[in-house]
Image: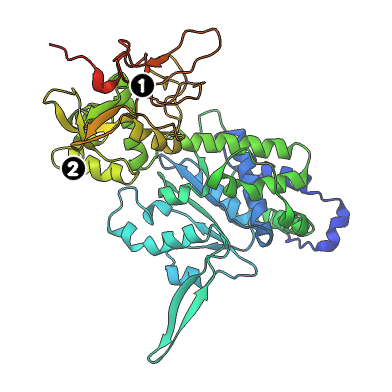
């Protein structure tokens, strides 16, 4: 029978180093679990180590271990995480109130949720609605200083109490977790072992004691680094919320030295890219991306009728728009979804001088949202052979050309009336003029009109209001 071994700070004389202990944690995972990539193993080792340094961190990254099917090793992986993490609390059918009261501000525990797909089922429903409070706790607890306030007491002796939420949490389950949780998480996607892949059998009563001993040694060494970790501002290979999530892990890797700083940054880039590419985007981002595809299929026109945009969205294979509601996506519902991004339709004269005015969307209105929310694609090229047409609007000089929108004459956004030299292709279709090259903008050929005209949009040299009528 294995004897439990307890370690104290005095055992640092044995020569334990943070780098060496991270290597041992790495070996523990590869001994009992087949993981999809080397970066996934490095991420798990760093995440477990980071649970011992929560006192020095501003963010508490979540860990999501998911799999498409049963028997992919997610529960076994979670067993190792539990054995190596600081003060693990296994939340089996625990109520949000119990979890609130289990989190200590000074020494936050590590929350462990297995079978998380029963808490947050993929199809939502009443179960997911009943656990919205738990999801709110997990989201708020990602950042320090976000306590929950509840009324406690009985009768007339009720008071408002604050409950800390800051604590690292690991969740394992079949399928994806809610987007708001995965956005704050290191996500590991497991897969079933192939016939030639073998691991050691894990027996809780036998194997937990060596892992607990490793946990104690790891905590002792990390305790000596807490001051440095609290002041660390590591160079991050990712941005925004992903940087908040990975910063505690990369700070630990930098403190460990050796190969760990490079491995940690590679893991951050690889796992974040995989998460961005897995297709679990929000409805709004999916709609923006599909609208961009419709504009591209139509040759990047300056405006598209609302009805044509709706039909184009419905024709996209594997998109949800054909079945969005009883009869598919409607122009009204499209307008509601796009209004969240400040994109609105207007009455546009698609053939000035003729009776072809209809509700539609200007491509320019999408430019800022495409640049901010949609992932860049290799196929995104300017219709005139230039650079990316989806750069945000940067305050071009006003134009004297006019286009009728909502019955009122307004400045035509597809022409420039600027005295400055344009130096690059932009989202309104005007290209720059380099020294020695043919000009791509000229003054309107209509006598008395000083509007600058983009020849790539109007090759006849006449501005928008002065386009000749065609039979």
Q: Is residue 9 left or right of residue 350?
A: right
Q: Is residue 37 above or below residue 43?
A: above
- Badge 2: few (under 14), some or many (20 or more) residues near its Cα, within 10 Å? few
Quadrant for the C terminus, please.
top left
Image quadrant where residue 427 sits: top left
Q: Is residue 23 left or right of residue 90?
A: right
Does label 2 or label 1 sit earlier along the sequence?
Answer: 2
Q: Is residue 211 visible?
A: yes
Q: Is residue 276 above or below residue 162?
A: above
Q: Is residue 317 visible?
A: no
Marks 2 and 1, how far apart at CA: 39 Å
Extreme-bottom residue of the structure: 156
Q: Nearer the viewer, residue 296 or 83?
A: 296
Q: Is residue 175 left or right of residue 307?
A: right
Quadrant for the N terminus, please.
bottom right
Q: Is residue 159 above or below residue 272?
A: below
Residue 221 percent coordinates (x, y): 78, 56
Mark 2 vs 1: CB contact within 8 A:
no
Q: Which secondary structure lies at badge 2?
A: helix
At a point 21% along the width and 31% down the height, the residue shown is: 348
Q: Is residue 96 above or below residue 346?
A: below
At a point 68% along the width and 36% down the height, the residue shown is: 263
Q: Nearer the viewer, residue 400 or 393?
A: 400
Label 1: which residue?
Answer: 450
Extreme-right residue of the structure: 13
Residue 362 percent coordinates (x, y): 29, 31
Residue 292 percent coordinates (x, y): 34, 29
Label 2: which residue?
Answer: 332
Q: Nearer the viewer, mark 2 or mark 1?
A: 1
Q: Nearer the viewer, residue 189 or 165?
A: 165
Residue 429 percent coordinates (x, y): 39, 21
């Amino acid at each position: 029978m294995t004897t439990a071994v307890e370690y104290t700070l005095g055992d640092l004389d044995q020569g334990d180093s943070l780098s060496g202990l991270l290597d041992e944690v790495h070996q523990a995972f590869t001994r009992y679990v087949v993981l999809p990539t080397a970066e996934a193993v490095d991420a798990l080792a760093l995440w477990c180590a980071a649970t011992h340094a929560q006192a020095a961190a501003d963010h508490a990254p979540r860990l999501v271990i998911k799999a498409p099917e049963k028997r992919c090793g997610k529960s076994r992986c979670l067993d190792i995480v539990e054995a190596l993490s600081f003060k693990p609390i296994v939340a089996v059918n625990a109520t949000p109130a119990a979890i609130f009261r289990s989190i200590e501000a000074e020494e936050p525990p590590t929350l462990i949720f297995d079978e998380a797909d029963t808490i947050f089922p993929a199809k939502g429903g009443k179960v997911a609605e009943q656990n919205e409070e738990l999801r709110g706790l997990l989201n708020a607890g990602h950042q320090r200083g976000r306590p929950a306030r509840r009324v406690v007491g009985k009768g007339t002796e009720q008071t408002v109490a604050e409950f800390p939420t800051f604590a690292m949490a690991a969740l394992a389950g079949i399928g994806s977790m809610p987007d708001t949780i995965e956005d704050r998480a290191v996500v590991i996607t497991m897969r079933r072992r192939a016939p030639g892949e073998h691991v050691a059998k894990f027996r809780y009563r036998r194997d937990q004691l060596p892992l607990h001993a490793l946990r104690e040694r790891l905590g002792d060494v990390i305790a000596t680094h807490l001051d440095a970790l609290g002041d660390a501002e590591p160079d991050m290979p990712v941005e925004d919320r992903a940087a908040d999530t990975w910063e505690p892990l990369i700070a630990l890797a930098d403190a460990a030295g050796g190969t760990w700083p490079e491995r940690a940054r590679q893991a951050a880039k690889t796992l974040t890219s995989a998460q961005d590419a897995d297709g679990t985007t929000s409805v709004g981002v999916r709609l923006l991306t599909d609208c961009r595809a419709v504009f591209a299929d139509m040759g990047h026109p300056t405006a598209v009728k609302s009805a044509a945009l709706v039909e184009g969205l419905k024709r996209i294979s594997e998109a949800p728009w054909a079945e969005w509601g009883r009869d598919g996506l409607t122009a009204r519902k499209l307008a509601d979804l796009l209004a969240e991004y400040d994109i609105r339709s207007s009455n546009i004269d698609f053939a000035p001088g003729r009776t072809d005015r209809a509700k539609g969307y200007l491509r320019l209105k999408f430019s800022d949202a495409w640049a901010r929310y949609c992932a860049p694609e290799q196929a995104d090229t300017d219709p005139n052979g230039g650079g990316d047409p989806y750069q945000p609007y940067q305050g071009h000089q006003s134009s004297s050309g006019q286009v009728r929108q909502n019955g009122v004459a307004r400045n035509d956004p597809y022409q420039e009336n600027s005295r400055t030299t344009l130096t690059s292709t932009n989202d309104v279709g005007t290209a720059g003029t380099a020294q020695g090259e043919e000009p791509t903008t000229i003054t309107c050929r209509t006598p008395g009109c000083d509007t600058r005209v983009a020849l790539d949009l109007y090759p006849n040299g006449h501005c928008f209001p002065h386009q000749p009528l065609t039979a």
